[in-house]
Amino acid sequence: MTKILIVCLGNICRSPLAEGILQSKLPNDKFLVDSAGTSGFHNGNPPDIRSIEVAEKYGLNISNQTSRLFKGYDFELFDHIFVMDQSNYNAVIRQAQNDKDIEKVKFILNFPGSKIKEVPDPYYGGEKGFENVYKMLDIACKYHSERLKNNL
Ligand code: 4NP
């Protein structure tokens, strides 16, 4: 089983979407996809309604996810960790114990042809921001799912 963790700040907007999208593109007998937040502000909460609704629009049900805090122990549990932005990256790397841990952490928009590095936080914006985030995560997850399935 290859285990992938997706991290954002609150674990209610971006990473729940990415978890649902990536899961839908990978065989679930070989891959486990989870998500977490670096803040813990929304611990125990379901995803933001705007994330639930945009996922639903594209045929994904993410409503049963629960926000949780990223912990240093996640480095032992997961093979790959994808972050949304520089601030998530810094918060995650701070808890790394060694180079092997650091190598596990990648920006989710780090793929050939991507024009931007960070997934913008849609929390304080309108629904259009969520649609935009969904679309960029869908493209990113297409790329990463192909690589993961080919063991790259
Ligand atoms: P996320 O968005 O990191 O994509 O889940 C946020 C959700 C909540 C907050 C910030 C970002 N907040 O400050 O409560």
Image (tube, rainbow, N blue to C red):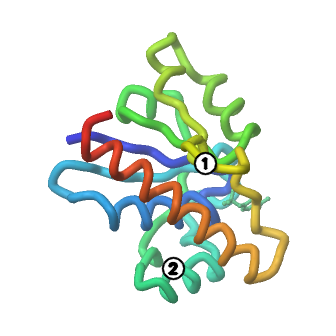
From the top left corner, tell me how far across and down residue 142 is, in percent.
Answer: 42, 58
Query: Visible in this render: residue 69?
Result: no
* Quarter residue 129 falls in: bottom right
Along the horizontal axis of the image, is 22 left or right of 42?
left
Along the horizontal axis of the image, is 94 left or right of 122?
left
Q: 72 and 93: which one is in front?
A: 93
Residue pictured at 65% horizontal, 43% vertical: 38
The quadrant of the picture showing ligand 1 is: bottom right
| Image quarter in which the C terminus is found | top left
Label 1: which residue? Answer: 113
Residue pictured at 52% horizontal, 61% vertical: 139
Question: What amino acid is found at the position of numbered circle 2 in the picture?
Answer: Ala
| Ligand 1 is within 8 Å of the C-beta of the residue at disc 2 | no
Along the horizontal axis of the image, is 129 left or right of 99?
right
Along the horizontal axis of the image, is 11 left or right of 90?
left
Q: Residues within 10 Å of mark 2 (few under 14, many from 20)?
A: many
Circle 2: element type:
helix
Residue pictured at 64% horizontal, 49% vertical: 114
| Ligand 1 is within 8 Å of the C-beta of the residue at disc 1 | no
Residue pictured at 53% horizontal, 42% vertical: 82
Label 2: which residue? Answer: 55
Observer-side mark, 2 or 1, equals 1
Q: Are marks 2 and 1 in contact (CB under 8 Å)?
A: no
Q: In this view, does 41 lie above or below 81?
A: below
Q: 27 and 35: which one is in front?
A: 27
Circle 1: element type:
loop
From the top left corner, tell me how far across and down residue 98 is, in percent.
Answer: 51, 11
